[in-house]
Image (spheres, rainbow, N blue to C red):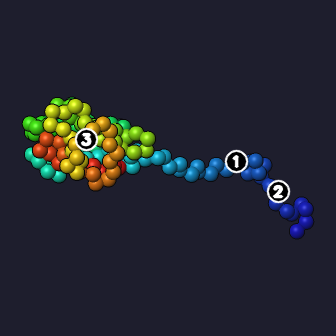
Amino acid sequence: MTEEQRPQPNAEVANATVKLPRPRQRRASKSLTAIHVEVVGGPMDGVTARVESDVLTIGRSPRSDLALGLDPLVSMKHARIVRKDSGFWLEDLGSSNGTYVSEHQVQGLILIGPGTMVSVGSTTIEFTPG
């Protein structure tokens, strides 16, 4: 093939920019660090609550994330679970009847993990993060 017979490159094609799709960036899923609880015993058995925030409140108040209005032994603002320093902490909020983990009354903040059973009033709650 002579120089004249050789196809000449198309100027538009030679200068074209090819855009490749960007790889999807995975964001850290908050669902992996969500706070989830389920009532596993007591007058509200089967009730669940899940929050994506750093605090889940437990109490008889309808404003609580886990509202236990049918348990008269639960205080209006009874306890809370807080995500802090890459862990989950349970705190009693000065309730009348206390908050218990494994029959031990909670004093201050205690570190909890998946499957922890928490007792408030006559209600038993299972904690599962994510």
Q: Secondary structure at mark 2?
A: loop
Label 1 to label 3, Cα distance in Å?
A: 64 Å
For residue 23, side relative to residue 57 (left or right): right
Give the mark toward the camera: 2 or 1: 1
For residue 70, side relative to residue 6 (left or right): left
Residue displayed at 24% across by 32% down: 93
Q: Which residue is mark 1?
A: 17
Q: Are marks 2 and 1 in contact (CB under 8 Å)?
A: no
Give the mark toward the camera: 1 or 3: 3
**Is 90 in front, or is 20?**
90
Q: Amino acid at mark 2?
A: Gln
Q: Amino acid at mark 1?
A: Thr
Q: Which residue is mark 2?
A: 8
Q: Are marks 2 and 3 in contact (CB under 8 Å)?
A: no
Q: Secondary structure at mark 1?
A: loop
Are there few (<14), some (14-19), or many (20+) residues within 10 Å of tag 3? some
Q: Amino acid at mark 3?
A: Val
Q: Which residue is mark 3?
A: 106
**Closer to the N terminus: mark 2 or mark 3?**
2
Q: Secondary structure at mark 3?
A: loop
Label 2 to label 1, Cα distance in Å?
A: 19 Å
Are there few (<14), some (14-19), or many (20+) residues within 10 Å of tag 1? few
**Closer to the N terminus: mark 1 or mark 3?**
1
Q: Quadrant of the N terminus?
A: bottom right
Label 2 to label 3, Cα distance in Å?
A: 82 Å
Residue 64 percent location from the top left of the image:
22, 34
Q: Are marks 1 and 3 in contact (CB under 8 Å)?
A: no
Residue displayed at 82% across by 56% down: 8
Residue 18 percent location from the top left of the image:
67, 50
